[in-house]
Image (cartoon, rainbow, N blue to C red):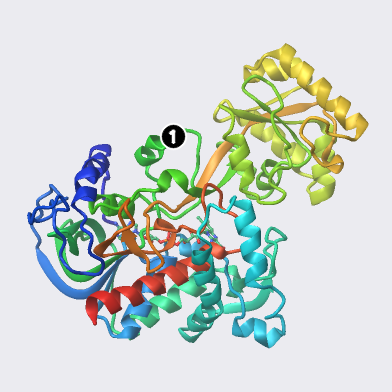
């Protein structure tokens, strides 16, 4: 695989030109050239300072960066419209995190019609759930566009060979509506592989092990890009439009740190390659960077502990456990993920550090509720390993506090108060449901720091309803489009699963929309 090292300097170089590039972005929509935006007729600032020596040049209509869930939809759509289309994928295989997805949201799909369930859910229910949750800070029209197209999108995917299992449900009870269309065998490869085959059969060129490096920007207009091939040679792609579908920046430590996310004890459950290339390139062209106001698919977990897959997710989603902060104080309803699971990450991040405490009573609860008798053995093994000074076992609360470096007197008082509430069956402090008030009385006790697994970033490049990349003033950057998690504007600071797999529905919808508008505006 061609590895592109996005150094901090490189990223900051992109960020550093933002002001100039934003100023440079003119008032024009579509693909016409821009002026410098300073009232003069001077050409817009060239944003890339790197000089490339291309070994090869290609001329295409549309180049798509990233062959994951959104990129394959954009490529098939563009090729279907008749555009000469090139898909670049930096990994040796297309798919990105799209390979790991299990299904997709849709309303009024042919599958639902065949099952007689197409009228069970309405857009009205969906949008009221989402707008209420986000305090009306989301653009309902983006949801409307995506939801109204979703049935057709799934039918379109099926017409391109995507395989669904036929099961439509609410995704393990996490969603509020039965709209999750499972891929066959729950495998995203049953989405990606047929779409790549379809793209190629429609005449698109798919190049793997080829990483987009920098946009070619001429007079304010995006006119293609430079890419690096597996052998290190540079490919120049001249294109009428570029669609960024690079899947976000969650694996780029520098970009994450710059946004306040220290990955030292973190993990990432995705496929490699999510280095923020799309965001960096968009910023270099003058795009509005909204990444700090957008969200992640993220889960609390225990750094370095292997039993993650089976029980850790359940345990870390809260419920009958006790959470305390760095001052050994309880700070929230631990069942805060009951409405939207991603609220767990939000709550944990309100503190400098968060620790989860379990007693024998709580372990018994989990064993019974999940039919998981191995839990004690798993916890003991984890405490033995304690790979990040993050997981301890003790016979008393005082010993637990000492091992984790918390104040023993405060922790003792916190536990006593919590047990009082459990005995009463009423959480007077944080209103946790009484069924989850399980006491912390009988040892052994366990404490685990709540580290964070960042699966993927969702959103960052600002875009409009046409999936045109826009400046801070809302002006489209000619020739530049984006789709998928690179530019998802459906959510704000929280990834809601109320509408299960809305993210993937948006990947397909935004990919298709970007391709249609790029074709209409720049190619036709
Ligand atoms: C483990 C996991 C499971 C998920 N499951 C679901 C689910 O079931 N339903 C749902 O709705 N959502 C799910 N999501 C969320 C989301 O839908 C996926 O992350 C989805 O893959 C996002 O699509 P994308 O096209 O934005 O990114 P990706 O599918 O990750 O594709 C991005 C691609 O761009 C490539 N790339 C990056 N930079 C460059 C470059 N410079 N040049 C060329 N190529 C580049 C990457 O290698 C990658 O292949 C899941 C996420 C994860 C991490």
Vertical relation: 497 (above or below) 306: below
Vertical relation: 416 (above or below) 225: above
Q: Residue 6's spot in the image, x, y percent? A: 27, 45
Residue 160 falls in image quadrant: bottom left
Q: Residue 491's spot in the image, x, y percent? A: 52, 55
Vertical relation: 70 (above or below) 312: below
Apparent side of residue 422 relative to residue 168 in the rendered image (left or right)? right
Q: Nearer the viewer, residue 442 or 340?
A: 340
Decide if residue 476 is in sight here.
yes
Residue in the image at 72% along x and 85% along y: 116
Q: As drawn, which residue projects farthest toward the front?
A: 39
The quarter of the image holding the C terminus is bottom left
Residue highlighted by disc 1: 260
Residue in the image at 68% along x and 61% along y: 175
Q: Nearer the viewer, residue 245 or 284?
A: 284
Residue 28 falls in image quadrant: bottom left
Vertical relation: 390 (above or below) 468: above
Decide if residue 499 is in sight here.
no
Ligand 1 picture quarter: bottom left
The quarter of the image holding the N terminus is bottom left
Q: Secondary structure at mark 1?
A: loop
Apparent side of residue 234 relative to residue 73 in the rendered image (left or right)? left
Q: Residue 291's spot in the image, x, y percent? A: 41, 47
Residue 474 falls in image quadrant: bottom left
Apparent side of residue 85 relative to residue 345 in the rendered image (left or right)? left
Mark 1 neighbour density, 10 Å: few (under 14) some (14–19) many (20 or more)? few
Q: Residue 130's spot in the image, x, y percent? A: 61, 58
């Amino acid at each position: 695989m061609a590895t592109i090292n996005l150094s901090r300097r490189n990223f900051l170089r992109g960020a550093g030109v933002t002001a100039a590039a934003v100023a440079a972005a003119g008032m024009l929509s579509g693909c016409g050239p821009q002026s410098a935006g300073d009232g003069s007729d001077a050409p817009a600032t060239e944003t890339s300072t790197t000089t490339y020596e291309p070994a090869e040049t290609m001329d295409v209509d549309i180049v798509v960066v990233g062959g994951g869930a959104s990129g394959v939809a954009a490529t098939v759509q563009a090729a279907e419209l008749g555009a000469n289309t090139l898909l670049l994928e930096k990994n040796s295989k297309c798919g990105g995190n799209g390979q790991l997805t299990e299904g997709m949201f849709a309303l009024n799909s042919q599958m639902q019609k065949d099952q007689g369930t197409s009228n069970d859910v309405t857009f009205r229910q969906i949008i009221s759930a989402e707008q209420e949750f986000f305090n009306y800070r989301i653009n309902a029209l983006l949801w409307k566009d995506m939801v109204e197209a979703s049935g057709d999108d799934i039918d379109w995917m099926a017409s391109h060979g995507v395989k669904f299992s036929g099961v439509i449900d609410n995704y393990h009870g996490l969603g509020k509506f039965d709209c999750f269309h499972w891929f066959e065998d729950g495998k995203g490869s049953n989405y990606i592989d047929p779409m790549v085959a379809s793209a190629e059969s429609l005449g698109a060129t798919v190049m793997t092990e080829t990483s987009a490096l920098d946009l070619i920007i001429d007079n304010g207009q995006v006119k293609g890009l430079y890419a690096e091939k597996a052998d290190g040679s540079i490919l120049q792609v001249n294109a009428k439009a570029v669609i960024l579908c690079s899947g976000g920046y969650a694996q780029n430590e520098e970009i994450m740190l710059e946004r306040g996310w220290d990955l030292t004890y973190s993990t990432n459950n995705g496929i490699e390659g999510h280095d923020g290339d799309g965001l960096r390139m968009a910023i270099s062209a003058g795009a509005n960077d909204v990444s700090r106001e957008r969200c992640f698919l993220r889960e609390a977990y225990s750094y370095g502990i292997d039993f993650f897959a089976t029980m850790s997710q359940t345990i870390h989603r809260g419920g009958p456990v006790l959470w305390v902060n760095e001052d050994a104080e309880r700070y929230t309803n631990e069942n805060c993920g009951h409405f939207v699971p991603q609220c767990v990450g939000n709550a944990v991040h309100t503190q400098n550090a968060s620790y989860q405490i379990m007693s024998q009573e709580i372990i018994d609860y989990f064993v019974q509720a999940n039919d998981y008798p191995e839990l004690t053995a798993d916890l003991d093994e984890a405490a033995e390993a304690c790979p990040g000074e993050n997981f301890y076992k003790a016979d008393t609360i005082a010993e637990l506090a000492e091992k984790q470096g918390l104040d023993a007197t405060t922790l003792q008082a916190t536990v006593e108060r919590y047990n009082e509430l459990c005995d009463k069956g009423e959480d007077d402090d944080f209103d946790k449901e009484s069924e989850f008030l399980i006491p912390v009385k009988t040892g052994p006790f366990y404490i685990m720091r709540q580290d964070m697994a960042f699966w993927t970033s969702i959103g960052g490049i600002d875009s409009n309803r046409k999936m045109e990349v826009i400046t801070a003033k809302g002006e489209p950057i000619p020739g530049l489009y984006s789709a998928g998690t690179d530019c998802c504007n459906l959510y704000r600071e929280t990834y809601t699963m109320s509408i299960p797999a809305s993210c993937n529905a948006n990947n397909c919808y935004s990919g298709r929309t970007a391709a249609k508008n790029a074709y209409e505006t720049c190619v036709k």
